[in-house]
Each structure stands twice: as structure tokens, then as C-alpha cells.
Amino acid sequence: MKNKVFITRSILPAGIELLRSAGFEVSVNDLDRALSYEELKEKGHSADALITMLSDRIDEEFLTYNSHLKVISNYAVGTNNINITKAHELKIPIGNTPDVLTEATAEVALGLMISATRNFFSANACAQNGEWIDWHPTKHLGHGLRGKTLGIVGLGRIGMRLAEMCSSAFKMKIIYTANSDKINSMSATRVDLAELCTQSDFISLHTPLTDKTRNLIGKKELNAMKKSAVLINTSRGEIINQEDLFFALQEKNIFAAGLDVTTPEPLPVEHGLFKLKNVMILPHIGSATYEARNAMSILAAENIIAGINGSELKSWVDKKDLLP
Ligand code: GLV
Ligand code: GLV
């Protein structure tokens, strides 16, 4: 009997082809929507292995019901949608897709830094709304990047890549938080979060979501930031206390924010954040390049093949991987 692989959304084809040529029976959810939790649970029941999206909730109940699964391969680097402790207990290996999306996500973080500090979104809205009356000497002003201090919260792969870009292109000074000192070519220094908040002109979040990092950035941290500070989040929405952020932006306690992630996702269109001019929101597109998504498709498939064959996954989520 052929092993059955179910893919919870239609992904780029390279990985699907790889799985078929490895001799597996592959089926794909080709409805153009996410499956409900119940639908997903049932799909899991008739499969040997799954490729899951970051929006699929793979919790204790799901895993207990589907404890027969040989491997779950998450089509994402973050795995906060999966109960890793339970999966380990049931000996279901969990794969993810680090490295291949590092460049793409760092690019979105950098893009948001520039867009947020230079008011791209509100200036674009002005141009579209007929408010572009004439060239204006003092409107739409922002703070430049060159020589400023960038604080990276969680200097992992993506944070490191953003730091390299900003250090080389804009001569920015880099400070960071992490659980240990990280070797780097930028003379970046490790500081505690309080110091990072007070010293940084730009702050970018790159830590995985865990019980320790949930609401890491709240009122206290936002109050400590400079009035000119720009806060960027391309990690997970839950790292920021979003109500506190709304207040800080509304009161102009910080200059701007650029968010590729929110709580919840999607963020309802009537949400107050959409009404503020100093926040730029993207619909979680960090890894959305052809290059990254193609490589993610292949890596997710390779993790499935290894898992079904009982060998070590190319990228295996261990609990230690969840530390920045
Ligand atoms: C995207 O957010 C990912 O974790 O891959
Ligand atoms: C994610 O891959 C990170 O380590 O930043």
C-alpha cells in the first residue's frame, strides 16, 4: 500500500512532484480556503503524513486523534501552531522550513522599516485620494535610516540577515537580545530588552512565539521607546500586546509600526489599527517570494520523505529550536 500524504493547501508544485516521484499517494486541499478544524482532523485520520500551514491548529486533541501520523511537515519556519510537546510524546516528528525563507522575510522587515519611517502607505493613500495638491515642503516627513540604531529582538537567522543588510547598506549600529551571545560580523552587542527599547531608533522582532515571548512588547516596553521609534513585526502577532500598541501609536508615543503579522489573522477590516495613519499592515507575506515558496515546497516534501522512511528529517523541530 502506498503511503498517503495530505497537503492542507495547494502549494507550489515542486514538492508535490517530489512526493509523487517518491511513490506516495498525494492529495491536496484544492478548495481555495483553509479547512475547518474538524475537516482537518478527518483528513489527518486517513493520511500517513501531512504538510500543514501555519494557520492549521495542530493541538493536543488533533494529535491524540491522529497519533498514527508518521510525520507532520509544517510549511513554515514557525511551529507555534503545533503542540510540539504532545507531538514529541507521541513520537511524531515535526518538520519546518527554516533558512529557505530567511532572505524573503528579512526583505519584508527591511521594506516595512523604510515604508513605515517614510510614510509610504499614508503618502500613497494621499496621492490616490486627490490630496496631492502640490509638492509640499513639510508634509510626509520621516526619519532616515543611516547611522541609526537597530534593535533586533531575537538574533536568529532572520534577525541576523536583517542586521547584516542594515549594517552594510545604512551603516546602522546593531544591538540585540538573545539567550546567548551570537557571533556576528557587525560588532553587534547583546543588551537586555529594557536597554534595547530605550536605545533603538528601529526595533524589529524575530523571536519565535512561546509562552515566554507572548506579549513580550507591552505598555512598559512601548513607553520606554523613543517618540521617533519605528517598531517592525514579521514574527508572530502575539509577541506584541496589540491593544498597548494601538494606544502607543494613537498617542504618538512611538513614530510608526510596520506589521506583517497581527492577532488575529486575518485582522478584521474594522479593526482600529487600520484607521491609524502611522501603522502599515501586510497580510503575513514574509516568505511570499517565488524563490522562498518553491524552496519551502521542496523542503517540506523532503521532510515528509525522511519521516515516512523513518530517517532523520532535514529540518527537525526540537524544543531547543524554539529558543532564539
Ligand atoms: C511564517 O510566518 C513562517 O513561520 O514561516
Ligand atoms: C527563523 O528562522 C530565525 O531563526 O530567525
Image: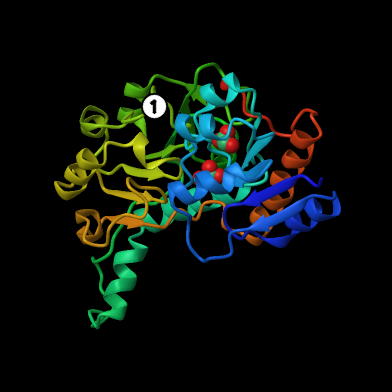
Residue reaching furthest top? 180
Instruction: Report x, y in % for residue 301.
Output: 73, 46
Q: Which residue has dot 1 on it?
A: 213
Would you identify the image quadrant in which residue 194 lies?
Answer: top left
Residue 153 visible to an observer of this rendering: no
Q: Is residue 116 left or right of residue 247?
A: right
Q: Is residue 173 left or right of residue 16?
A: left
| Residue at left offset 34%, top offset 72% | 124
Quick one: SS at disc 1?
Answer: loop
Would you identify the image quadrant in which residue 312 lies?
Answer: top right
Number of on-image labels: 1
Q: Quadrant of the N terminus?
A: top right
| Residue at left offset 31%, top offset 69% | 123
Residue reaching furthest left? 251
Instruction: Report x, y in % for residue 75.
Output: 60, 46
Instruction: Report x, y in % for residue 217.
Output: 31, 32
Residue 16 visible to an observer of this rendering: yes
Q: Amino acid at mark 1?
A: Thr
Asked whether 185 or 92 is in front, the reply is 92
Asked whether 157 or 51 is in front, the reply is 51
In the image, the residue with mark 1 has its CB under 8 Å from the nearest atom of ligand 2: no
Q: How is the image coloured?
A: rainbow
Mark 1 residue crowding within 10 angstroms, few (<14) / some (14–19) / many (20+): some
Q: Is residue 210 left or right of residue 298?
A: left
Instruction: Report x, y in % for residue 122.
Output: 29, 66
